[in-house]
Amino acid sequence: MEYIDINKDKEKIVLLIHPMLSSAEGMKKLIADNIGNEYRYIIPDLSAHGRLIDKKYLSVRQESENLHNYLKENDIRDISLAFGASIGGVVLLELLKHKDIKIVKALFEGCSLCQNASVLEFIIRNIVLYERKKAIKNSDSANRKIISIYGETMGRMMAENLIRIDKQSIKNICHDCAFVDLPKLSEAEQKRCIFCYGSKEINLKYAKRVISKEYPYAALRIWKGQNHCTKITTNVEEYCKMIKAEID
């Protein structure tokens, strides 16, 4: 992993883990720059993204181990808030298995909780690979489509990364989103977790069932009228205020 690690003199630490097709720089611009400089921000580039675009993404476990090692090497044991979107949320779930790191609040946006969902993996993988193929043939069309969903700043970055990311990394990410190994969390640990989903997400009903069964003490927030990870880009100021409120 490569990291943006800024404001190291600040006491409270915020960990931001980006979704597929974004990057550490994307999370900095979207969240850290809008929240303010009173916190230390640790923002990793997942493999096959950002400064690691040429490195294959292998598994969520490997990404989590890399992140855990970075935290240990920098003597970080307490994180005020950890945020993970989409595949970043799955990485954060895996990080919660490491009990030597205390995460005061864990905020998940559009995080898959699917287990043994081979059909879903097949569908998502083929959709993303198809969109990638179209984007390579017509980048302008891909830019317009993704920007219309995620806005100018994030959309343009995601469209560019869709072309650059390799096929095997896409396949591995889609697999990890369909075969999530849920961590065992105590009641106290569950109460530190907030799961957020757009009301139009295709796996919302499944996520609600899993949360009810596995994490009944966690909070669930539904963004009305929103799709997968669109809430954060359609109303950045409101979303960042929500994150800041959870830190304080």
Image (cartoon, rainbow, N blue to C red):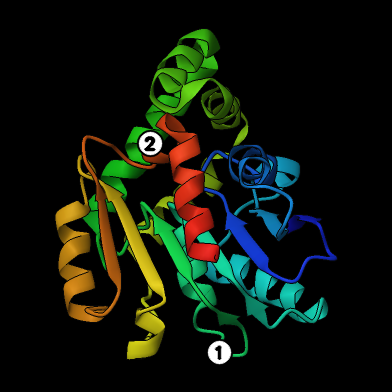
Is any atom of residue 50 visible in this view? yes
Relative to 29, 88 lies left or right: left
Instruction: Tell me the tag on residue 209.
Output: none
Q: Within the image, what quadrant is residue 101 found in?
A: bottom right
How packed mark 1 is, by other alpha carbons closer than 10 Å (few <14, some 14-19, many 20 or more), is few
Q: Look at 46% across and 60% down and name the residue there.
A: 89
Above or below residue 167? Residue 184 is below
Relative to 103, 199 lies left or right: left
Nearer-N-terminus badge (1/2): 1
Relative to 231, 64 lies left or right: right
How packed mark 2 is, by other alpha carbons closer than 10 Å (few <14, some 14-19, many 20 or more), is some
Above or below residue 58? Residue 28 is above
Residue position for label 1: 99
Above or below residue 218? Residue 36 is above
Q: In the image, residue 20 lies at what x, y percent?
A: 51, 44
The amino acid on which the numbered mark 1 sits, given as a three-letter code, is Lys
Residue position for label 2: 230
Q: Quadrant of the N terminus?
A: bottom right
Q: In the image, residue 126 lies at what x, y percent?
A: 34, 37
Q: Look at 42% across and 33% down and name the residue there.
A: 235
The amino acid on which the numbered mark 2 sits, given as a three-letter code, is Thr
Q: Look at 48% across and 63% down and name the residue there.
A: 246
Is any atom of residue 114 visible in this view? no
Q: Quadrant of the C terminus?
A: bottom right
Label count reads 2
Secondary structure found at label 1:
loop
Taking depth in this image into account, of 21 and 122 the one nearest to the observer is 21
Q: Within the image, what quadrant is residue 68 found in?
A: bottom right
Q: In the image, residue 240 lies at what x, y percent?
A: 51, 46
Q: In the image, residue 24 lies at what x, y percent?
A: 67, 46
Q: Marks 1 and 2, how far apart in space?
A: 31 Å
Secondary structure found at label 2:
loop
